[in-house]
Amino acid sequence: MTPDLKACGQALLTATINASLALALMLLIEFAISGSFQLADAYVWAVSVIGLVIFFAQFWRQRHLCRHCQSERENDAENLKT
């Protein structure tokens, strides 16, 4: 269970940072085009979708990496015993 929680935390952090950067970029482009910062509903939906996609992709990746590292540690521990 610990590798899943670690992967979830890392994926959540990555998704939050990337979604925040995407929102900042959208607002910057909105300001460049119209001259004002207007948070449209489309931006909220786009950031939500971006955040969810990144979260699930990173969770799957981090979970795989954590389990792989854990299995390597177990194999190393078994090799040291023999």
Image: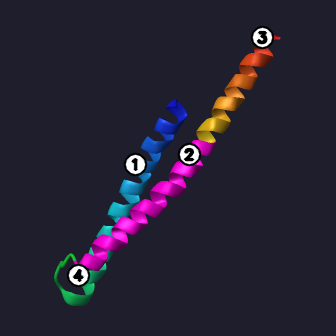
Q: Is residue 19 left or right of residue 79?
A: left
Q: Which mark is residue 13?
A: 1
Quadrant of res 18:
bottom left
Image vertical order of residue 26 relative to residue 70, above or below: below
Farthest residue, direction front: 1
Q: State the SS at label 1.
A: helix
The nearer-to-camera label among 1 and 4 is 1
Q: Position of residue 67 (x, y in %)?
A: 63, 37
Farthest residue, direction bottom: 34
Q: Is residue 6 left or right of residue 26?
A: right
The disc, 3 or 2, on the residue closer to the chain's N-terminal end is 2
Q: Which residue does the numbered mark 2 point to in the structure image?
A: 62
| Crowd rating for badge 2 (residues with CA inside 10 Å; few <14, some 14–19, many 20+) | many
The disc, 3 or 1, on the residue closer to the chain's N-terminal end is 1
Question: CA–CA distance between discs 3 and 4?
Answer: 63 Å
Q: Position of residue 60 (x, y in %)?
A: 57, 50
Q: Which residue does the numbered mark 3 point to in the structure image?
A: 81
Q: State the SS at label 3.
A: helix
Q: Amino acid at mark 1?
A: Leu
Q: Amino acid at mark 3?
A: Lys
Q: Amino acid at mark 2?
A: Gln
Q: Which residue does the numbered mark 4 point to in the structure image?
A: 31
Question: CA–CA distance between discs 1 and 4?
Answer: 27 Å
Q: Are marks 3 and 2 in contact (CB under 8 Å)?
A: no
Q: State the SS at label 2.
A: helix
Q: Position of residue 37 (x, y in %)?
A: 18, 78
Q: Main secondary structure of the magenta part?
A: helix
The disc, 3 or 4, on the residue closer to the chain's N-terminal end is 4
